[in-house]
Image (spheres, helix red, strand yellow):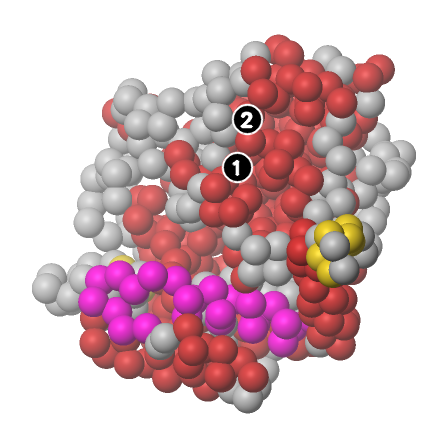
């Protein structure tokens, strides 16, 4: 610690003193995280909820009340009390916000308000899980017809950000080095094409492909029944979302390869919006007011938050594949799955899993610094918040799952067995490296010449050191399985004529 002498008095450099205090606090929180990652992450999510500004008539506790509950180790009790009071008071919590409140009550409530018009009660706009399962219990032969051509002609409400060749080069160079400066161009184009929102829907073409294709009808219905049934009992440790989806498509008559592709496309839709999936369907034109396929998606999306909550203490969270272990649950598994989908698709299209992994991960960093334009929050919230604030910790958790998803998705496009990853260890590494990020020289020099938010990127990088979330020593030894692309090339009518087990 530095000081300087003025007369007979020593004056401390308070900047050094502040750094010392922050490091001490960081060390203490790191010990807390290592002791119980699940409780630590739940606590950060709870504090973030309690300290967020009140909206829609909410009543939030004072900062002093939150600090007092934290000191008394009663933060979960205060969270539950606050949620229950506000849920009665406002009736305005949507399912996405309920997902982010780390208590069983909020996540169970998602299954009580599935947005779907009840065919037996035209005035009923929501239903509980039991009613939804009743409607799905019997297979319907008549399904909705979606007007895909009309939908594809919609104006893009969220135009893509213009990314120059140099900016793409920076994205690749930052992780893979100067020799691969322009190696990620094709993969970044693939990622941008898929991830750019259209009419408030991310992955619009995937959504329309699935909703038009009758091959999904029975499998997604069976998956909804299977996944929702887990909410009624203790979830076995070997169960996971990916396997349940794939098994359901196989039970409906799909081949091994087709069921794999159908599972990934289903995950792309689910991960584009989480528990508020129904809001993404509002702008999708369709012929009838009801449809089992839509309801099946809603049921799955509503079931995942409570299943993840129930399994987070086991060391494996239900929403993640068996190769991904960890207990840090934010209710946002979509950070893993959407990154994984992008990495897998870029690998299949362009043939290089390493650059596909990097491109998918960089897109998630781009999302984090652009959230003011394409989501809630903005980069200033991330940069200006305390390094040990709940906002900062949740950002690190999101990055950890994005990094794991990027590697998993790239490897799943090949014949290689996916690497086993523990996301708690990645979050720990990100906490340890807090404030120690060193942007590459070219990025540091070039960023100030770019428009915001790119110009703020070096500051954000220094704070979070995000690349620690990506396994840059990943092994890619498998052959890229291009045969998965054949599924999309086969017209639905031809496939139905070949295999009548699909609902045509």
Q: What residue does disc 2 label?
A: 454
In the image, what residue occupies the spot 30% across and 64% down? 54
Q: Quadrant of the C terminus?
A: top left
Q: Nearer the viewer, residue 235 or 171?
A: 171
Q: Is residue 91 rendered magenta in the image?
A: no
How far from the left and from the top, in percent, is residue 454? 55, 26
Q: How far separated are the C-alphas under marks 1 and 2?
A: 8 Å
Q: Quadrant of the N terminus?
A: bottom right
Of callouts 1 and 2, the N-terminal one: 1
Q: Is residue 343 above or below residue 188?
A: below
In the image, what residue occupies the spot 41% across and 73% down? 63
Q: Could you tell me what secondary structure mostly forms the magenta stretch?
A: helix
Please give left or right for residue 192 compared with residue 412 in the image.
left
Q: Which residues are magenta?
A: 37-60
How far from the left and from the top, in percent, is residue 74? 51, 86
Please give left or right for residue 195 compared with residue 65 in the image.
right
How far from the left and from the top, in percent, is residue 32? 71, 74
Cβ atoms at labels 1 and 2 below 8 Å apart: yes
In the image, what residue occupies the spot 76% across and 27% down? 440
Label 1 environment density (alpha carbons within 10 Å; few <14, some 14–19, many ≥20): many
Q: Is residue 82 above or below residue 333?
A: below
In the image, what residue occupies the spot 64% across and 12% down? 166
Please give left or right for residue 13 compared with residue 375 in the image.
right
Q: What residue does disc 1 label?
A: 369
Label of residue 16 in the image: none
Farthest-out residue, top? 165
Q: Nearer the viewer, residue 32 or 388?
A: 388
How far from the left and from the top, in percent, is residue 192? 53, 25
Q: Quadrant of residue 64?
A: bottom left
* Secondary structure under the numbered disc 1 in the rendered image: helix
Asked if residue 411 can be seen in this view, the reply is: yes
């Amino acid at each position: 610690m530095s000081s300087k002498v003025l007369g007979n008095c020593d004056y401390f450099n308070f900047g050094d003193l502040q750094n010392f205090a922050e490091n001490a606090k960081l060390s203490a929180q790191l010990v807390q995280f290592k002791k119980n990652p699940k409780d630590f992450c739940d606590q950060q999510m709870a504090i973030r909820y309690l300290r967020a500004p009140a909206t829609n008539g909410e009543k939030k506790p004072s900062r002093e009340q939150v600090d007092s509950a934290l000191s008394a180790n009663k933060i979960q009790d205060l969270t539950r009390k606050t949620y229950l009071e506000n849920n009665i008071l406002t009736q305005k919590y949507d399912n996405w916000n309920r997902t982010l409140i780390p208590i069983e009550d909020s996540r169970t409530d998602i299954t009580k308000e599935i947005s779907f018009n009840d065919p037996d009660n035209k005035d009923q706009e929501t239903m509980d899980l039991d009613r939804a399962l009743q409607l799905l219990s019997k297979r319907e032969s008549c399904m909705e017809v979606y007007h895909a051509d009309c939908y594809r002609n919609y104006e893009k409400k969220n135009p893509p950000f213009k990314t120059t060749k140099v900016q793409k080069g920076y994205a690749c160079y930052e992780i893979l080095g100067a020799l691969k400066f322009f190696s990620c161009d094709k993969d970044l184009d693939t990622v941008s094409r898929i991830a750019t929102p259209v009419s408030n829907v991310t992955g619009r073409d995937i959504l329309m492909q699935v909703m038009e294709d009758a091959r999904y009808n029975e499998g997604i219905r069976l998956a909804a029944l299977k996944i929702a049934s887990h909410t009624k009992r203790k979830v076995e440790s070997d169960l996971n979302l990916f396997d349940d989806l794939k098994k359901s498509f196989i039970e409906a008559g799909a081949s091994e390869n087709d069921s794999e592709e159908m599972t990934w496309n289903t995950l792309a839709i689910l991960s584009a919006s989480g528990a508020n999936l129904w809001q993404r369907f509002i702008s999708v034109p369709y012929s009838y007011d009801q449809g089992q396929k839509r309801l099946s998606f809603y049921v799955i999306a509503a079931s995942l938050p409570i299943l993840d909550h129930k399994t987070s203490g086991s060391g494996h969270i239900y929403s993640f594949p068996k190769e991904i272990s960890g207990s840090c649950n934010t209710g946002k598994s979509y950070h893993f799955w959407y990154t994984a989908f992008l990495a897998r698709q870029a690998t299949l299209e362009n043939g290089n899993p390493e650059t596909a992994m990097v491109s998918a991960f960089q897109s998630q960093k781009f999302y984090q610094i652009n959230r003011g334009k394409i989501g809630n929050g903005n980069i200033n919230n991330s940069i200006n918040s305390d390094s040990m604030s709940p906002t900062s910790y949740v950002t690190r958790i999101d990055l950890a799952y994005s990094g794991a998803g990027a590697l998993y998705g790239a490897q799943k496009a090949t014949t290689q067995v996916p690497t086993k990853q523990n996301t708690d260890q990645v979050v720990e590494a990100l906490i340890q490296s807090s404030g120690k990020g060193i942007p590459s020289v070219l990025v540091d020099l070039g960023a100030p010449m770019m428009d915001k938010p790119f110009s703020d990127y070096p500051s954000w990088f220094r704070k979070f050191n995000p690349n620690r979330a990506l396994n840059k020593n990943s092994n890619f030894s498998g052959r890229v399985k291009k045969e998965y692309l054949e599924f999309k090339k086969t017209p639905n009518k031809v496939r139905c004529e070949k295999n009548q087990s699909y609902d045509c």
